Structures are given as structure tokens and as C-alpha cells.
């Protein structure tokens, strides 16, 4: 996925860029609407993250311009306003979704996924490991002609493994990625999801291996 | 509610009092003048008759063979006597010699002549007499003698006539007074009508109609209109500033928080040692706490501001709740929580209220439900009409056991017994309660059979 981040705060843009890079998504950063126009003139983006208050204008105007020239690139607006009606106004002018600052990467990821799912043709995005194919936008797992539906946390956990196969992840690392930092989580919560995924992967040539004292990793059998 | 300070006497009453005093004074002057003139006219009429009678007596004086002869003019007396029941007295003297008539009638010190008799009112026999006195010199045997005629008449008829005329005069003046008072009321009302029309025009405006008032008004109200429009302009500016301030505050608080949170999350993903991870988790958790507090304090500020300055519009309730569900679904999906929405209200049902306030209440209610729900459960939202009100209910299954003390939970910065490990500020339900008070609705929280917690907002359909 190719992402354009339009955000005047370099401090906020930096971790966003890193986040997308870590997940294997190429990205560009524009500090102003002028820079954003330059990027969009020469490249197509699968996702645009748009801030509203920018030094050289209002992000909503930029969005209007995009839609006026029939550019239907998915746009998620990053807003500091939490009123729903304010956000609904953003949808009315053509935003695909909005996210209120400050947000968790997991929520941003979920909203990106939901927006991409709604866009036609984007459902072809898939991750493969051995004979197993993961469709993140459809939240399904496919092998040997069988399809398994995944719950959200199962999907996100599997995405972590599929993006970094053979790599060990500690229980804490996985917990931090899977659960919101603001919620109460028991130490062994991650084991429940690992157990479920093992059941769903049963019969395929992929399995989740546990190494005591180190963590979990996705390996092929 | 602001108490309006008013002076004791209204402008209308003040004008009416002034006009009433003027009318009363004018009526009094009118009455006294007319009464005086009438009295003078009645008196002049009697004086005219007395003069004619006196002259007539004097003309009947003859001198023959050096002697004076009188023929009393009975016809004149008859005329005088024909008017009412008044009595007539007369006295004729030649110089200081009494000739005929009532001898005890007092002699006057001065007499007039035939053209201008002297008139005087005297007390005689217990009555007031109007007296005409004239004298005329005649020559009797070469000597000049002044013939003095004194003729008087009681004034009972005149007094009666004057009394009747005064009565009529009083009726006329009172009628005039009433008519003038009526005119005063009509005039005052007519004068105050432009102010009333202006007040109606301003009063009919919606609570957020802050356009300048361009209602046609008389020139005299121009300073008031100018001041009113200046005030509206300043108010509009102040409200705009407040809105801008809230938006700017949100931006300036949330953007750096977003930066810290994102950097923290990123660092957490890259951190290798358990110690570093623990530190970073603490940082991210604190940022989340700060964010929630900032969000709810901003919400609280918006609620207080909107309670004073509500932006009431017709709001489609179904659409409003749908938007809310759409807004929360991705966050719920992250925790494998499903949000179900069920409604039995007509699709076109609209309420006339401030949408932002309603959304703030719904958002805080849903946010609470999401925070405290057990994973992989369902939050059920139902929308129904109950008699003359509609009810939005949010049901969830709490992750931890909870004791309900509704009075405690809706207090600011107080949190439920299950909130220990969950980030929050304790303002959510207090905000919901304040919104419901502003919207004239109610908030109820109760446990239902099966362990579900149900929070309901009820709003009147009237």
C-alpha cells in the first residue's frame, strides 16, 4: 500500500511514516497542501491521510478539489475535533473516514483496512505464507480450498506473523500490538488468540511455534 | 434564568401619568374659567334687568308744580318678578330724604348714572341682594335735587341657574376629560407600537439568529437600534471567538498528544528490553489518560457553552444514532466487540434540539460502554418511543463486576467500581447528565436480568 501523509507537524508525521514503513507500506510526507499537490501530480496513492489545519490552507478545501477532479483516492481525515457532526461534515465533502487525534496505530490500521475494503478492487490485497493466503481486507484465511473467517484480533495477530515470518515475538510485544494500552488485559490473554489461530491453521503447512522463554513465531512445516 | 431589572413605572405608564396630569390640569382650568364666565354671564343678565328697572323708575319721575311725582313701573316689577321666585326691594330718595320703598334698605356710598349704574351685592334681611344704584339730578323750583333709585333683587334664581349650569359644565368637562384620557391611551399605545413591533421582531428570532436587526423603526429609536446591532455584532464576535478557541485548543492539545502517543507506540514496537517496554507503556498510558481528560474537559466546555447558547435545529434521531454507530464501529472491531442497532421509531422522527449536545451525550455513553465491555461481546443500541418520549438505550456486558451507585457515578471525576484498570477521567457520565439536563431529558443506569448494564437517555417528543 502506498500512503501519502499530509500533516504539517513533522513530529507527528515522523512516527506515522515509521509505522507504515514497519508494516511494509511505502509512504510520502507532505507538510503543506502545495507539497501534497506536487506528490499527487506524479504519483497515485492507495491511501491519503489528511490533516485539516495546514499552513497554506484548509484540508477540507483540498479534499473538495480532489473530488472535483474525480480523484477517488481513499482519504482519511485526521481531525482534532471530536464532535460527530463535525466529522459527518467531513464525510459529506468526500472523506472516506476520519480519525480523531491522538489515535492508536491499531485504530488507524483498522480504519485504513475498512476504507480499503469499501473501495472496489482493493479486496485483492493478500498476504501469503506457504500454502496459506491471508486476505486482510476480507478478514479470511484460505488454504486447501477452505476459507476460515477471522475475528479482528485474530486477523491482526496473523498479520503480524505474516509480515514477519520466522521472527520471534514475545508475549509482551504481541500484547502491546493487539490490545489497547488503555484497556485492562490479563497476562495470558494472548495465549487465547494463539490457541484459536493454531486451530484455524490446523491442516495447513503453517503453524505457530512456541519457544519457552522467547516467544512465538510463524513457521512452515 | 436571568432576572430582568425594570424601573417601577413603565414607559407607557409614565407617559399616561404625565398625560393624565396634563388633562386633569387642563380640565380644571377649563372648568374654573367656564364656571367664572358663566357666573359672570348670569350676573350680567340680572344686572341688565336691574338696570332697566332702575332706569324705568327714574324715567317715571315727573316734576309738576314744583313737586315730585312717581309712577311706579309695575310692569317692570312684573318682568323682574316673573323670573323665578326672587323678591324685589327698592328705595327712592331725593338727596338724603327717603321718598318711597323699603326705608331700611342701606344707602350706598356711591351711585351710578343711567348709562352706567353702580352694581353691588349686599346682605339684606338675611339674604344676598344684587342691587343697581343710579341717581339723576333734577331741578325743582330752581334747586338741583338728586333723585336716587336703589333696586335690588335676591339671586336665588341665578344661583339655581348657576348651579344647573355648573352641573352641566362639570359633565362636559368630565366627558372631555375621559375623551382626552382615551385619546392619551390610544396615543401612547400608538407611540409605543414601534417599540413593541421591534421587540416582537427580535423575540421571534431563533436563538442563533445573530443577524443585524433591520426592522423599520421611527427615527427616535435609531440610537437603540444602533446599540442593539452593535451588541449583536459584539456577541457574534465573542461566540465565534469561543468556537475558534475550542477548535484551536483541541488542535493544540491533541496534535502534540498524538505525536507523543505515536512516538511512544512506535518506540514500544521497537523496544527490546522488558524495562524499556514497561517505561514506554507507562508513557503511552499517561498520554491516553491526558487525551481522555482533555477530550472530556473540552466536551464539558462545549456542553456548558452550548447550554447557554444552544444551536437548536431539527435533528433526525435515527440518522444521528446511525452516524454514532458508524463512528464507533472501527474502534469496537479492534476489541472484537459488535455494535448492534435496533430501532422501532419512524425513520422521519425529528427532534428540535442542539445536535452537538445530543451527540456529546451519545458519544460519552458509547465510549463508556466500549471501554468497560468484555471483549467479544455485543453492545446493543435500541431506539424506541415510549408514550410521548423517545428512549435511546445502550446495553453492554461489563468486563468486571460493577456496583451501581447512580448518584455517585454521575458526579464529576467519580468513577465506577470497575474502572480501576481502565483509562478514564470520570467526567463521562457527568457530561451525559449535564447534557440531558440541558435537553430536558433524563439519564437512567440499571442492571438488567442476565448481567447487562443498561444506560438510557429519554427525551421528550413534545
Image (cartoon, rainbow, N blue to C red):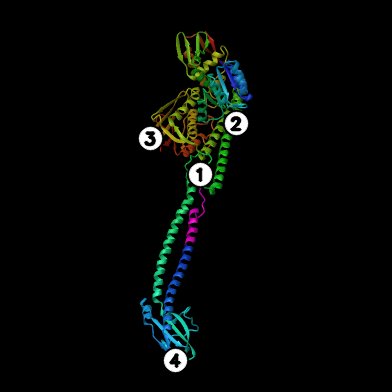
CA separation in Å, label 2 and label 4: 137 Å
Q: Is residue B18 magenta?
A: yes
Image position of A16 with respect to A219: above or below: below
Query: The magenta stretch spans which residues?
Result: B1-23
CA separation in Å, label 3 and label 2: 41 Å
Label 2 in the same subunit as label 1? yes
Q: Is residue A145 magenta?
A: no
Task: Bin the neighbour count of mark 4 within 10 Å (Cα to Cα): few under 14, some 14-19, many 20 and up.
Answer: few
Image position of B161 with respect to B245: above or below: below
Choose the circle earlier in sequence order: 2 or 4: 4
Question: Residue sitting at 44 percent across and 84 percent down?
Answer: B149
Choose the circle earlier in sequence order: 3 or 4: 4
Label 3 in the same subunit as label 2? yes
Choose the circle earlier in sequence order: 1 or 4: 4
Image position of B260 with respect to B231: above or below: above
Residue B127 at least partly seen: no
The residue tagged 1 is B216
Choose the circle earlier in sequence order: 3 or 2: 2
The residue tagged 4 is B66
Mark in front: 2 vs 4: 4
Choose the circle earlier in sequence order: 2 or 1: 1
Residue A220, horizontal then vertical, whole percent: 53, 9
Q: Secondary structure at mark 3?
A: strand
Q: Is residue A212 left or right of residue B401?
A: right
User: Which quarter shows the C terminus of chain B?
Assistant: top left
Q: Secondary structure at mark 2?
A: helix
Question: Residue sitting at 37 percent across and 36 percent down?
Answer: B387
Q: Nearer the viewer, residue B302 or B406?
A: B302
Mark in front: 3 vs 4: 4
Rendered image: mark on residue B253 = 2
Residue B223 at least partly seen: yes
CA separation in Å, label 3 and label 4: 128 Å
Amino acid at each position: 500500500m502506498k500512503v501519502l501523509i499530509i500533516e504539517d507537524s513533522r513530529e507527528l508525521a515522523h512516527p506515522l511514516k515509521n509505522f507504515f514503513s514497519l508494516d511494509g507500506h511505502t509512504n510520502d510526507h507532505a507538510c503543506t497542501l502545495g507539497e501534497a499537490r506536487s506528490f499527487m501530480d506524479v504519483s497515485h496513492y492507495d491511501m491519503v491521510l489528511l490533516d485539516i489545519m495546514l499552513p497554506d490552507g484548509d484540508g477540507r478545501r483540498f479534499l473538495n478539489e480532489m473530488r472535483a477532479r474525480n480523484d477517488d483516492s481513499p482519504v482519511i481525515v485526521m481531525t482534532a475535533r471530536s464532535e460527530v457532526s463535525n466529522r459527518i461534515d467531513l464525510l459529506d465533502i468526500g472523506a472516506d473516514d476520519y480519525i480523531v487525534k491522538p489515535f492508536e496505530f491499531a485504530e488507524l490500521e483498522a480504519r485504513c483496512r475498512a476504507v480499503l475494503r469499501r473501495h472496489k478492487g482493493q479486496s485483492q490485497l493478500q498476504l501469503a505464507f506457504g500454502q496459506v493466503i491471508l486476505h486482510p481486507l476480507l478478514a479470511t484465511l484460505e488454504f486447501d480450498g477452505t476459507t476460515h473467517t477471522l475475528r479482528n484480533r485474530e486477523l491482526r495477530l496473523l498479520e503480524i506473523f505474516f509480515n514477519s515470518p520466522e521472527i520471534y515475538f514475545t508475549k509482551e510485544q504481541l500484547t502491546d500490538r493487539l490490545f489497547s494500552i488503555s484497556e485492562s488485559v490479563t497476562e495470558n490473554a494472548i495465549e487465547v488468540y494463539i490457541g484459536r489461530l493454531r486451530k484455524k491453521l490446523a491442516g495447513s503447512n503453517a503453524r505457530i511455534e512456541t519457544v519457552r522463554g522467547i516467544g512465538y513465531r510463524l513457521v512452515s512445516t | 434564568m436571568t432576572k430582568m431589572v425594570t424601573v417601577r413605572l413603565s414607559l407607557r405608564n409614565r407617559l399616561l401619568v404625565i398625560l393624565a396630569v396634563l388633562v386633569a390640569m387642563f380640565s380644571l382650568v377649563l372648568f374654573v374659567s367656564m364656571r367664572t364666565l358663566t357666573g359672570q354671564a348670569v350676573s350680567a343678565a340680572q344686572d341688565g334687568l336691574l338696570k332697566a328697572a332702575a332706569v324705568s323708575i327714574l324715567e317715571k319721575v315727573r316734576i309738576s308744580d314744583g313737586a315730585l311725582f312717581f309712577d311706579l313701573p309695575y310692569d317692570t316689577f312684573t318682568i323682574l318678578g316673573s323670573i323665578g321666585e326672587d323678591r324685589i326691594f327698592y328705595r327712592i330718595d331725593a338727596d338724603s330724604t327717603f321718598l318711597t320703598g323699603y326705608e331700611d334698605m342701606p344707602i350706598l356710598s356711591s351711585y351710578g348714572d343711567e348709562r352706567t349704574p353702580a352694581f353691588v351685592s349686599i346682605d339684606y334681611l338675611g339674604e344676598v341682594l344684587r342691587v343697581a344704584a343710579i341717581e339723576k339730578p333734577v331741578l325743582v323750583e330752581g334747586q338741583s335735587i338728586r333723585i336716587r333709585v336703589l333696586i335690588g333683587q335676591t339671586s336665588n334664581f341665578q344661583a339655581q341657574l348657576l348651579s344647573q349650569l355648573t352641573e352641566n359644565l362639570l359633565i362636559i368637562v368630565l366627558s372631555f376629560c375621559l375623551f382626552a384620557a382615551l385619546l392619551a391611551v390610544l396615543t401612547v399605545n400608538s407611540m409605543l407600537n414601534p417599540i413593541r413591533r421591534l421587540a416582537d421582531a427580535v423575540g421571534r428570532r431563533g436563538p442563533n439568529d445573530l443577524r443585524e436587526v433591520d426592522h423599520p423603526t421611527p427615527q427616535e429609536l435609531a440610537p437603540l437600534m444602533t446599540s442593539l446591532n452593535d451588541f449583536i455584532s459584539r456577541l457574534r464576535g465573542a461566540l465565534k471567538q469561543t468556537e475558534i478557541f475550542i477548535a484551536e485548543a483541541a488542535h493544540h492539545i491533541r496534535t502534540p498528544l498524538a505525536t507523543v502517543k505515536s512516538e511512544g507506540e512506535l518506540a514500544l514496537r521497537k523496544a527490546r528490553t522488558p524495562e524499556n517496554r514497561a517505561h514506554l507503556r507507562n508513557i503511552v498510558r499517561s498520554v491516553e489518560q491526558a487525551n481522555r481528560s482533555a477530550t472530556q474537559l473540552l466536551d464539558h466546555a462545549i456542553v456548558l457553552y452550548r447550554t447557554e447558547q444552544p444551536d437548536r435545529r431539527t435533528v433526525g434521531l435515527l440518522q444521528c444514532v446511525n452516524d454514532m454507530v458508524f463512528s464507533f464501529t472501527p474502534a469496537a472491531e479492534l476489541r472484537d466487540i459488535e455494535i448492534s442497532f435496533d430501532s422501532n421509531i419512524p425513520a422521519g422522527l425529528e427532534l428540535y434540539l442542539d445536535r452537538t449536545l445530543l451527540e456529546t451525550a451519545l458519544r460519552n455513553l458509547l465510549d463508556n460502554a466500549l471501554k468497560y465491555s468484555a471483549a467479544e461481546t455485543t453492545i446493543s443500541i435500541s431506539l424506541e418511543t415510549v408514550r410521548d418520549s423517545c428512549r435511546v438505550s445502550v446495553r453492554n456486558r461489563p468486563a468486571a463486576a460493577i456496583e451501581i451507585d447512580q448518584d455517585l457515578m454521575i458526579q464529576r471525576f467519580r468513577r465506577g467500581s470497575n474502572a480501576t484498570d481502565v483509562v478514564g477521567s470520570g467526567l463521562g457520565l457527568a457530561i451525559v447528565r449535564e447534557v440531558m439536563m440541558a435537553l430536558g431529558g433524563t439519564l437512567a443506569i440499571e442492571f438488567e436480568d442476565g448481567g447487562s448494564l443498561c444506560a438510557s437517555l429519554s427525551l421528550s417528543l413534545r
